[in-house]
Every structure is written in structure tokens, then in C-alpha cells.
Image: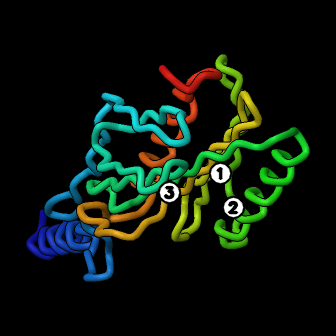
Amino acid sequence: MSRTAAVSVLSAIIALTASCGGGRSSDMPTPRRHAFPRVEQLDTTRRHIAAAELEIGLSASAEAESPREDWVTAHYPSLGANLHLSVSRFSDEKALAEAIANRRQRMALNAGGGNPRTDNFSTPEGWMCERVTAPERVATPVQFIAAGPGFTLVSGAFALGGSLTPADSLRPIVEELDNEAFKILTTLPAEGGKR
């Protein structure tokens, strides 16, 4: 092989090697040096707090109080959220239906006009439950109602209001609150209010 042919082959190899290098520019995505921490999952142990003689099962992670007989406020420090829950008893089916319609209207307003996911289910204890989860960034991402024995209505909303660290987005927090709402609803007691 002549010297010029060898130089041509070597030049071609160098050019191919340089073009295969990807020519990484600064706007190309690169992996982060470390990932964001995960949201701490709530304690699976349930503790009960009474509201209008009905035991409400909350995660042991919640700091709960009952400032009025028919009201529960619970703070979830690891999620930066507060639960506002009320228990109301009505005299008949018509009054209960009006209260449910009013609460559904309120939940729609709280969802911010987005397209929230609504899950309807019933429990073996006789509760008809509705859980609304808003995928958009709203102050009350998870809300619920449950109509049960004795014309009773349980209504709750999780409000974001604390620090959202260490989460890098709302999604894991909303998922954890959605799971907590489901557990609250599925642990509501049968008539008589005690578990």
C-alpha cells in the first residue's frame, strides 16, 4: 500500500470515529447525579378517632384531632397535607340526597374545572362511596363522600398546604393521599359506628 493510500485510509478512519462520537452538545439530556428522594409511605397501622359517634380509621402517621363532635382534622406531615372530614346525620333520604348533591357540586368546584377521576364503590358495611382525584395541580387533589346507614354522610377533602419536600412532583403525594382516602372509606364501620 502506498503512503498516500495509507494516509487516505487513516484520514477516513479518523473522520468516521469523530462522527460516531455523537457530538454531545450542552442541550442533550443527561442523567442526574442523584435521584430525588421518594415520598415516605404512610404507616399502614390504623388508629381510630371518633366523629359524631362514628369511628374514622386514619393512618397512624396522621396527627389527628376532633375540634367539634362531627369534625376531624388530620395533618399528614410527610405529605404536606391536611384532611378535613365531617360526619353529618340526616332525618330522611331526601335530606341526605340534597346534601350529597351539594357536596358533589363543591367537589367539582374544588377540582378546578379539570377532568378528575371518580371512583364509585360500596362496602360490605353498607356505605356507598365516591372518591374524586384531580390529576391537575389543585389545592384539594383528593376528595370523597360516603353515604351509609342511618342517613349518615361522611365527607372529606385532602388539602395541600405544607412543605412538599422531598417530592419533586405532586403525583406521588396525590397517589398516597388517594390510597389513604380509599382506606378511610373501606374501614368505615357498619351501623353503630364502632369497629
Q: Is residue 121 above or below residue 194?
A: below
Q: What crowding class fits label 2: few (fewer than 14 Cα within 10 Å), some (14-19), or many (20 or more)?
A: many
Q: Is residue 63 above or below residue 186?
A: below
Where residue 102 sits in the image (x, y, percent)?
79, 60
Where residue 106 sits in the image (x, y, percent)?
72, 65
Q: Secondary structure at mark 1?
A: strand
What whole-number distance in Å separates the C-alpha atoms at marks 1 and 2? 8 Å
- Residue bearing mark 2: 107
Q: Is residue 7 above or below residue 93?
A: below
Amino acid, disc 1: Val
- Residue bearing mark 3: 84
Q: Earlier in the sequence, mark 2 or mark 3?
A: 3
Q: How is the image coloured?
A: rainbow
Residue 180, label in figure: none
- Residue bearing mark 1: 132
Q: Secondary structure at mark 2?
A: helix
Amino acid, disc 2: Met
Instruction: For marks 1 and 2, give the one nearer the viewer.
Output: 2
Instruction: For marks 3 and 1, give the one nearer the viewer.
Output: 3
Q: Residue at x 85, y 47 (%)?
A: 97
Which quarter of the rendered picture does the N terminus lie within? bottom left
Q: Is residue 166 above or below residue 96?
A: below
What whole-number distance in Å separates the C-alpha atoms at marks 3 and 1? 15 Å
Q: Residue at x 31, y 28 (%)?
A: 45
